[in-house]
Image (cartoon, rainbow, N blue to C red):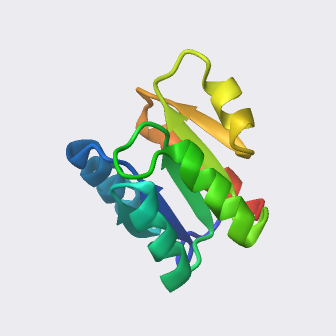
Amino acid sequence: MATRAGTSVLLIEDDVDLRETERLLLDDAGYDVVTAADGAEALRRVEEAPPDVILLDMRMPVMDGWTFARELHARYGDRFPLVVVTAAEDARARAREVGARDVLGKPFDIDDLLLTVEQNATAH
């Protein structure tokens, strides 16, 4: 398995419990994890420390995933691999709407989360 040390993940999720669970799983797997509760906070995090991969929830208060993705692309182009994390039935369509590289359906298992992050961080 590829080394995860030094690989940064920006996790954007408004559900506090899910965000903390994902953060712990990724942290335990060796990733450097930064979290944000909404798109506005996430844009600040990108400015502070550019991530290797971004996990993006779509439905959030303040700034939703669509608005975040639009602003991210306007500022940085396709510099950051974006993975949509959603429970929507049309998850692939949501990912295409925002120019995401990949999609992870909710609920997901731990192995799927880790594999998705690893594949998208190493493809960066």
Give the residue at x 78% y 62%.
78
Q: In x, y percent, where is residue 15?
A: 27, 43
| Residue extending farthest bottom | 48
Q: Can residue 121 be seen in this view?
A: no
| Residue extending farthest left | 17
Q: In x, y percent, where is residue 88?
A: 51, 21
Relative height, residue 84 to residue 19 (above, below): above
Q: In x, y percent, where is residue 40?
A: 43, 63
Give the residue at x 69% y 54%.
120
Give residue 26's quadrant in the image: bottom left
Query: In this view of the protein, which residue sits in the foreground, 116 or 16?
Result: 16
Viewport quadrant of the C terminus: bottom right
Relative height, residue 88 to residue 45 (above, below): above
Q: Is residue 117 visible?
A: yes
| Residue extending farthest top | 89
Relative height, residue 34 to residue 107 (above, below): below
Query: In this view of the protein, which residue sits in the foreground, 20 or 95?
Result: 95
Q: In x, y percent, where is residue 20?
A: 26, 53
Query: In this view of the protein, which residue sits in the foreground, 73 or 16?
Result: 73
